[in-house]
Image (spheres, rainbow, N blue to C red):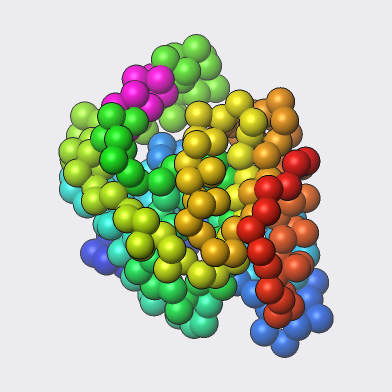
Amino acid sequence: MAEITANGVRFHVQRLTARKSCQVDPPTVIFVHGLISNLSSFFFPLANAVADAGAEVLLYDMRGRGFSERPPTGYSVSDSVADLDALLDALGVCGSVHLVGRCYGGTVALGFAIGHPERVASLVLIEAAVVGERWAEGIDKWIVGARARLAQGGQAYRRRRTTLEALVNGTTLMADLRTSRPFSAEELSTVTCPVQAICGAESRTLHHAYRLDELLPRYTLTILPGYDHNVLAYTNPAVVRDILLAWLALESAPHSRSSRETPY
């Protein structure tokens, strides 16, 4: 386990070296997890397969989650973007990277692409949410729903319940998220890197995926029939893994893409 201090916060980071690559300079893939999860949500289902395929892989626990430090403040979307930017600097990551974000991690990835386009080669957005006009209302509903879902999960979800309550009751997470500035249509249209979105047909974030399809110039949406919002965590991660590996292999060569929806 590595600990890196960036933006004034101590972060838990895991780094996987490319295990098979014909490239002198293999691509770098950064995984950004969801709102109350941690890097383990990506480590076993996706990260090892990506390293096996020939990419350098970085995973980190966002501030307040997993083994990272939990300061009392600094939980807005812009704070999360600043954390990622500082973390890449602290780790000496040069050039552009492929960002893979799930749920809130996708929100952070989008914000990072808006603020630091030169550092992003492509985005993979898994059930991502977009900061919009009704963002604050959606955050409140999500917290209520998360508490209910985790309560039904028994001992297996004890750590996530503990994380949720610690963040809600012991930090400014809720206030910071509620007041996060929405992404404007103009800002989203500046995200010109290739974007692969993955969303369950029954997902509560599907409308976000369709909104991005209207605004992002190089956007591919893959909808998975029969899946809900937990397409990665609770159903079949192999489906997401295969889409991700195919996308990264495609993005390793120069090309031009047009927006399309891909049924799976």
Identity of the residue drawn at 55% across and 69% down: 193
Q: Is residue 257 left or right of residue 104?
A: right
Identity of the residue drawn at 34% across and 20% down: 144
Counting from the top left corner in percent of width and height, residue 235 is at: 69, 29
Identity of the residue drawn at 27% across and 57% down: 79
Identity of the residue drawn at 52% across and 82% down: 95
Q: Is residue 143 magenta?
A: yes
Instruction: Looking at this view, name the residue that lies furthest to the front.
Output: 214
Counting from the top left corner in percent of width and height, residue 80 is at: 33, 56
Q: Is residue 6 left or right of residue 39?
A: left
Counting from the top left corner in percent of width and height, residue 138 is at: 34, 31
Q: Main secondary structure of the magenta part?
A: helix
Q: Is residue 216 left or right of residue 51?
A: left
Residue bounds of the magenta highlight: 139-147
- Which quarter of the figure has residue 115? bottom left
In the rendered image, the vertical position of residue 170 relative to residue 111, given as above or below? above
Q: Is residue 18 magenta?
A: no
Q: Is residue 190 left or right of residue 184?
A: right
